[in-house]
Image (cartoon, rainbow, N blue to C red):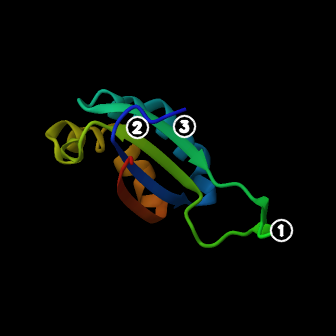
Amino acid sequence: MPMKTKYVFEATMDVTAEKEDLFNEVYDTEHVPALLKVPGVIAVSRLKREAARICLGGEEIDVADTGLPRYSALYEIESPEVLTSTAWAQAVELGRWAAEVRPHTSNRHHILRKVI
């Protein structure tokens, strides 16, 4: 399915095993709904890295854990300015995310991508 906008913000991270259930609950029931209310946020998709085998150059290979974060969220946004808006700044601090979940995350990366 094609992207609905010209910008995608990607947030990737790992979470400690003992907080993984809380991480997923809060992300799905609090964090994503709060960010979807921010003007300029069109859609959010969450992803979890899985092991896989692929064919490449005529050879089947394992796609191993390369140290990349296990979880990703893709935010389809109207413009880069969404990420510096007051609404975004407030939404990322709402609920249990900031105090109960964020401290248990690591290997965090934030990337803005332009859809081409």
Residue type beneath disc 2: His
Give percent across and percent down for residue 75. Answer: 40, 41
Q: Kindly state the secondary structure of the residue where label 1 is placed.
A: loop
Mark 3 residue element: helix
Tell me which label, 1 or 2, sits earlier in the chain.
2
> Residue at position x 71%, y 54% from top?
50
Type of amino acid at the residue the image marks with label 1: Gly
Check the image and report above or below for 114 versus 4. below
Eye-nearest disc, 1 or 2: 1
CA gap, disc 1 and disc 2: 42 Å
Where residue 21 sits, quadrant-wise, is: top right
* Residue nearer the viewer, 101 or 108: 108
Displayed quadrant of residue 6: top left
Q: How crowded is mark 1: few (under 14 residues within 10 Å), some or many (20 or more)?
A: few
In the image, taking residue 34 as reference, residue 55 lies left or right, namely: right
Mark 2 — residue? 31
